[in-house]
Amino acid sequence: KSWVSLSWLSHGISTELLDIVEKMTKDHYKKTMEQRFKEMVAAKGLDAVQSEIHDLDWESTFFLRHLPSSNISEVPDLEEDYRKTMKEFAVELEKLAEKLLDLLCENLGLEKGYLKKVFYGSKGPNFGTKVSNYPPCPKPDLIKGLRAHSDAGGIILLFQDDKVSGLQLLKDGDWVDVPPMHHSIVINLGDQIEVITNGKYKSVMHRVIAQSDGTRMSIASFYNPGDDAFISPAPAVLEKKTEDAPTYPKFVFEDYMKLYSGPEIPSPKNQ
């Protein structure tokens, strides 16, 4: 229980908006980021590496913050139409994330609005977008597009390239491809959902494999708890747990993120 792909029929975001977001994102990369990436590759000698790289991802990225306050107007090199479109896209994704939180409550037998309340903290949730492009890689066997990890936050909404693949998740010890689907939003659940559900929903390890042909677009939006949100297993879930089920820790989300960003990424279990 973690990853699911929603088509435009169920996620409710218009195909017209998705097409505009994709075109503008790819145009922005070619216009302002592609040459910088090539210069970085040349400066680090990455096109001639002979052994596996463990401390670098083959990706070109920038970040947008939507909540609790937006920084879109401050991010350099974005054309005004692109800023406007990404703001519109973020509004639709925020609505979708909140619908998914309510669906999770229903599935788990939690009172409606429980997860939204937990995520809110005192200042509202954190919501932001990582816009990534994964250019063709000359050494895809030695450099990962994005190294294996689980997501630290809550709900992740991914709009990815429908032609160039690369996303994989770890299932039963094997890496499984997540195939591109046109006009779909791929949903993943992060560590905070695993803790709140006391493991009923899992935060899954995933990675991106660099490709030798084609540039893969990835727009991942993270709907996370507020910094001071108190995270712990929902009491209603604990009431139903079996004797051998783990009990997850209680913590403040900001403290968890400090650990997650440190040299060793924690597991949410039994901290």
Image (tube, rainbow, N blue to C red):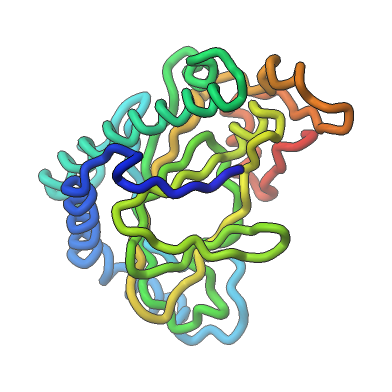
Left or right: residue 271 compared with residue 225: right
Residue 197, image x and y in percent?
A: 65, 28
> Closer to the camera, 92 or 152?
92
Q: In which quadrant of the rendered image does the C terminus lie?
A: top right
Residue displayed at 43% across by 16% down: 123
Single out the residue that lies furthest toward the right: 243
Number of marks drawn: 0
Residue 178, image x and y in percent?
A: 49, 61
Residue displayed at 27% across by 69% down: 34
Asked if one can make out residue 250 in the rendered structure from this viewpoint, the answer is yes
Left or right: residue 251 compared with residue 161: right
Single out the residue that lies furthest toward the front: 9
Instruction: Examine the rendered structure and indicate whether residue 136 appears above or below residue 173.
Output: below
Residue 129 sits in which quadrant? top left
Q: In which quadrant of the rendered image does the N terminus lie?
A: top right
Left or right: residue 33 compared with residue 206: left
> Closer to the camera, 119 or 57?
119
Residue 12, image x and y in percent?
A: 28, 37
Residue displayed at 70% across by 15% down: 235
Asked if one can make out residue 220 in the rendered structure from this viewpoint, the answer is no
Residue 93, image x and y in percent?
A: 33, 36
> Closer to the camera, 245 or 269?
245
Instruction: Examine the rendered structure and indicate whether residue 100 appears above or below residue 22.
Output: above
Left or right: residue 266 compared with residue 179: right
Single out the residue that lies furthest toward the left: 81
Residue displayed at 54% across by 16% down: 114
